[in-house]
Image (cartoon, grey):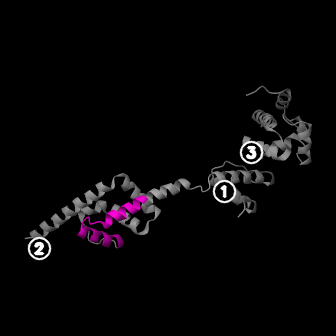
Amino acid sequence: MALSEKSNEEISKLLAKYDIKHGPIVDTTRKLYEKKLEKVMKSAPVQSSPDKTYYREEAEEITYITYHQSSPVQAVYSDMLKRRGNVEPDEAKESDQGTEPPIQSTNRAANHSTIRSGELVRKSGGWSLWKVIRLLLLLAVLAAFLYYSYCRLNDIENPFAIQ
Amino acid sequence: MSSTSQKHRDFVAEPMGEKPVMALAGIGEVLGKRLEEKGFDKAYVVLGQFLVLKKDEELFRDWLKDTCGANVKQQGDCYGCLKEWCDAFL
């Protein structure tokens, strides 16, 4: 895939890719642009190198999340998470709605580790992962409490078998 | 910018018409001959190349160096000359 074998259009595209302002690729100009491209390609081997570091950060974030998700946050809740991560939630717990997207995306990030979900991971990572986990815990407790009181209301004795 | 030569001032004073390539500042006999051999026998042909390179200094300098072996000063003189001519007449 030598530069000299590429068509004029391909050279033009490469120049645009490296943000090199250029004129028409004609016989007299072609060699100059090939030289320029070689120089640029040597100094910056992959145009997306900043993206690479970006991805590495995400990889760290992803592994961080998987570690914490596997640790016993709450046995019930993590089960719920796993189920919800794979299947769309039918039962809608009101308080959970707001935070569900981040959970799902972080779970997916753990499973698939794609860049897109990694972006969301990164956003939540910026917001401090611990805050997210604490908030989820709080919501879980609240949800349990609401369910308990709802059952009490409907006269179901001891929904959690709490004496 | 350094003071311009008489040749430069003469060139940018009027439309180049059919002036030979050696009328360009920085292009003497030796370089002029090399350019003519490559087909750039008139100043306007070099102007054409200058314009096709979108008046880019770096590219034009490289091209001049590759085509006729001009040194840095000669490249600069020729580029400046053509640029000023374009500013005035193009």
Q: In the displayed structure, would residue A134 be above or below residue B80?
A: below
Q: Residue at x 88, y 35 (%)?
A: B23
Rendered image: mark on residue A14: 1
Q: Nearer the viewer, residue A79 or A145?
A: A79
Amino acid type indicated by mark 2: Ala
| Label 1, label 3: how far apart the Cα atoms are | 17 Å
Callout 2 crowding tier (Cα within 10 Å): few <14, some 14–19, many ≥20: few
**For residue A38, which quarter of the picture?**
bottom right
Is residue A43 at all visible to an observer of this figure?
yes
Q: Position of residue B36 (x, y in %)?
A: 91, 45
Amino acid type indicated by mark 1: Leu
Amino acid type indicated by mark 3: Leu
**Horizontally, is A147 left or right of A77 in the view?**
left
Rendered image: mark on residue A161: 2
**For residue B60, which quarter of the picture?**
top right
Q: In the displayed structure, would residue A107 be above or below residue A135?
A: below
Q: In the displayed structure, would residue A125 be above or below residue A159?
A: above
Q: Position of residue A28 (x, y in %)?
A: 80, 51
The residues colored magenta run A60-86
Callout 1 crowding tier (Cα within 10 Å): few <14, some 14–19, many ≥20: some
Helix, strand or loop at mark 3: helix
Q: Nearer the viewer, residue A8 or B44?
A: A8
Q: Nearer the viewer, residue B58 or B88?
A: B58
- Establish whether labels 1 and 3 are both on one chain: no
The magenta stretch spans residue B30 = no
Contact flag, marks 2 and 3 (Cβ < 8 Å)? no
Answer with mark 2 or mark 1, whichever residue precedes in sequence: 1
Helix, strand or loop at mark 2: loop
User: According to the image, label 3 marks what residue?
Assistant: B59
Q: Nearer the viewer, residue B74 or B41?
A: B74
Q: Residue at x 77, y 34 (%)?
A: B80
Q: Which of the image's four quarters has the C terminus of chain A?
A: bottom left
